Image (spheres, rainbow, N blue to C red):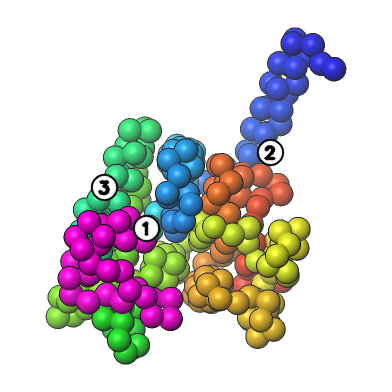
Amino acid sequence: MLNESEYFREAEATRVRVLSEALPYIQQFRGRTVVVKYGGAAMKDSNLKAKVVRDIVFMACVGIRPVVVHGGGPEINTWLGKLGIEPQFKDGLRVTDAPTMDVVEMVLVGRVNKELVSLINQAGGNAVGICGKDGNLITARHQGIEGVGFVGDVSNINPGILNSLVETGYVPIVSSVAADETGQAYNINADTAAGEIAAAIGAEKLILLTDTTGILRDYHDPSTLIDRLDIQKARELIDQGVVAGGMIPKVNCCVRSLAQGVRTATILDGRIPHALLLEIFTDSGIGSMIVASEFSA
C-alpha cells in the first residue's frame, strides 16, 4: 500500500513517462496534417466532447495540423421532430427530400459546426467553420440511389481553402454539406467526406471516431480487435463477412484514402476519453490502423 507521498511520486513518474513516450510522435507528426472525422458518442456526450476538443487543441499546440470533418445525425433528428418532419431511412441512408435538406443544412452548418468552432476557440485553439460549399471545397453529385433524395457523393475536392487555413495556423471544422454544379445542396456522409479530404490535402493520417472498438474478428468479443492490417487484408475481411454492416463503408473509406496517398487510417473508439491522444502519442495506440501494405508505416 503506497502512502500519500509515494503515491504522488508514482503519479509524477507516470506523467514523465507519458510525456517522454509522446516526444517522438510529436516530432513525427509536427507540421503534418491529420484529418479527424468526428461523430458518434463522442459528439453526443458532453464530457467526451470536451475531451475531444482538448485533444484537437493539444494537437494544434504541438504543431500538428488537424482538420475536423463532422456529421450530426442525432441533432438533425431532434430538429426534424421539432419541425414535425418524420425522419426516414432507406438501406441505412437518410431520405433527404427538399424540406429535410433544409434542416440538414441548418443543423450541420448553422448549429453543430459553430458549436464546435466555439468550443475549440474557448479551449485556446483557432478554429474556423466551413462547409463543402465554401471555396468550392466539395463538389457533390447525386449518389445514384433511387428514393433517397438529395444524398450526395463527392465528385471533386478543391483543397485550396483548407490549405490556406492550416498554413496560417487555423483548425478547419468542416460540415459535410456540399452542392453540385447547379448549386443544389446535398447531404454527404461525413466518413466519405473525411476520406476524400484527407486524400486531397495529402494528410499524414485519417482518423474515424466511431462507436466501436475497431475491426473485430468476432464482433461480439472486443478482445478480438485487429490492431493493424493492410489494404489487402481489409478487403479480404469484407469478402469473408468479418467486416460487415456499417463497418463496410468505414473500411472502404479508409482503403480509398490510403490508395490515394494517405499514410495511415485508423478506426477509433470515440467512447474512450482522449482517444485521439492515445492513438497518436502512445506506443500502443488504440483502435484498428489500416496501412497501404504490410511493409508501410
- Where does label 1 land, which residue? 74
- Dot 2 amino acid type: Glu
- Where does label 2 land, which residue? 21
- Dot 1 amino acid type: Pro
Q: Specify whether 33 is left or right of 115.
A: right
Question: What element does badge 3 sit on?
Answer: helix
Give the label, 3 or 1, closer to the camera: 1
* Mark 3 or mark 1: whose residue is earlier in sequence: 1
Query: Disc 3 to disc 1, how far (Cα)?
Result: 16 Å
The stretch in magenta equals 73-102
Q: Position of residue 127 (x, y in %)?
A: 31, 44
On the question of residue 269 being in view, the answer is yes
- Where does label 3 land, which residue? 114
Q: Residues within 10 Å of mark 3 (few under 14, many from 20)?
A: some
Q: Specify whether 27 is left or right of 284.
A: left
Query: Disc 1 to disc 2, how far (Cα)?
Result: 37 Å
Task: Give the residue displayed 73% in from the left and 62% down from the top.
Answer: 221
